[in-house]
Amino acid sequence: MRFEQFLRDSATRFPDKTALVTQGKRLTYAQLDDLSDELAQGLINRGIARGDRVVLFLDNSAEAVVSIFATLKAGAVFCPVNPSTKADKLAYIINNCRARALITQQKTAAVAADAALACPSLALTVVADGDAAPSHAGFAHWGDVLAVPAFRLMVGAPGIDLDLAMLVYTSGSTGFPKGVMMTHQNVIAAAKSITTYLENTSDDIILNVLPIAFDYGLYQVLMAVKVGATLVLEKSFAFPQVILARAAEEKVTGLPLVPTMAAIIIAQRNLEPGALPDLRYITNTAAALPPTHIERLQALFPHVALYSMYGLTECKRCTWLPPAELKNRISSVGIAIPGTEAYVVGEDGERAPAGVVGELVIRGAHVMKGYWENPEATARALRPGPHEWERVLYTGDLFRTDEEGFLYFVGRKDDIIKSRGEKVAPKEVENIIYALPGIAEVAVIGVPDAILGSAIKAVVATEPGANISEVDVVRHCARFLEDYMIPKFVEFRPSLPKTESGKISRRLVAETQAGNAQNA
């Protein structure tokens, strides 16, 4: 089975049900199915064939959702790219996967045009909004590409489930993004597992503000369509009061978030406990929620199941913590998602006993097929598993387990700071600092030190009105941490730099630190 079949099935079961709410538009499942059929046929008419790559350079919109399923129905592979991406990086991605088509929008058309000039593989560039294509040479408009409305694409998968469904580019240590290859089988396995433990049904109404160019936001679209739920799609969380009002208005039952969103929500002064009475669950991934954030979310939403999770693009999701376990294991990211296995290995490659820190390894049908045309990086990530016929995913993340097998995130391998000859996990220090009232954001980095090797530095942003000094942070850390883990330096900033997916970036924090030092 290929993933686009889930849209056909939901359109058959719930033709008049609202599938998508976004930007004042409401599309039923029948309309979403028909529109994606028309665009799929239009792409085929313009020469897009099975296995071709189609780059979607779009923000959260109805056009983006239609384009995802149209690409799949055409037998092609969709590649979502964040619309804030610059021309050079966009051109790199297009050239790396030799994309045949690019679908963009009016506000990013100039960037797309600059990138397209350097991309000989492109045969078609489509502008999805507005009344007409801009004057850039070779641009087509969405309306011109759509097939005749009376036409309906013939039912029947143009391929099999082992074909690639999507390429999602993720940051690489070399500075060049890597294309994560996910087949229809991979996507279905991940979506089935996640919707199982979240107990999603067609009655769910899911609010998504996360970019669908990234897998956490993207899977909100895919999972909603799989179960026939309604997706309320917003462009960002820049205006939290507006978004929370929308959640109440639409009677939202599911809210996926990342730690920066959690920090904003718990800082809302007019949000009373028990708000959003229809809300059934909140999920978190991208980075672990600090325990203090979890406690404050639970106080605000005592009727809501809170799922702490962990995942990465290479397999979508790895672990989930059953909400009933939060009370006793607030720092854990849980156990392997249904149908998969997650375990920790030491430097010798053997499974590590409870309490010993090692690298997390993932087995399951949701594990990627590799990085697009990058055999060296693929070989580092996918290595021989317990059986001679399989490859398992080495995540590059450090974890430990407790005696019952629950997993705890320690840090990225390349994030570990060596100070005074001791290894310091930034996440452990950050969690302690987050427990200090008034802290909104924190990133812990290592800075060069002639005596210590690396000194611990905490870069923090405080909540509005908070009166916290460097001494307050250091004294607080001294109460809970070993002396070698206590920050030697504390820097205050209005906010911390983040990745395109909204996660605080220690790398960007460190680069800003280095830049400031050079300018001093």
Image (cartoon, rainbow, N blue to C red):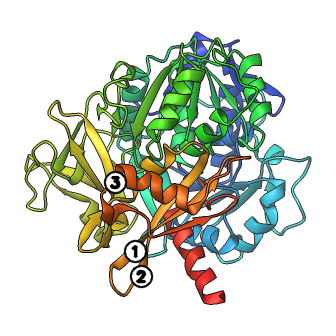
Percent x, y of residue 446: 42, 72
Q: Quadrant of residue 108?
A: bottom right
Decide which of 156, 467 is in the foreground and name it: 467
Label 2 is placed on what type of residue? Pro
Mark sitting earlier along the chain (2/3): 2
Percent x, y of residue 250: 73, 18
Q: Is residue 343 left or right of residue 516?
A: left
- Residue 189 visible, this orientation: yes
Q: SS class of the residue under badge 3?
A: loop
Decide which of 365, 515 is in the foreground and name it: 515
The residue identified by callout 3 is 481
Label of residue 448 in the image: 2
Q: Are marks 2 and 3 in contact (CB under 8 Å)?
A: no
Q: Tally the numbered discs.
A: 3
Give the residue displayed 75% in from the left and 73% down from the top: 114
Label of residue 96 in the image: none
Q: CA–CA distance between discs 3 and 1?
A: 15 Å
Give the residue displayed 65% in from the left and 12% down from the top: 277
Q: Are marks 3 and 1 in contact (CB under 8 Å)?
A: no
Q: Quadrant of the N terminus?
A: top left
Mark sitting earlier along the chain (2/1): 2
Q: SS class of the residue under badge 1?
A: strand
Label 3 is placed on what type of residue? Leu
Q: Are marks 2 and 1 in contact (CB under 8 Å)?
A: yes
Q: CA–CA distance between discs 2 and 1?
A: 6 Å
Give the residue displayed 74% in from the left and 46% down from the top: 465
Q: Quadrant of residue 262?
A: top right
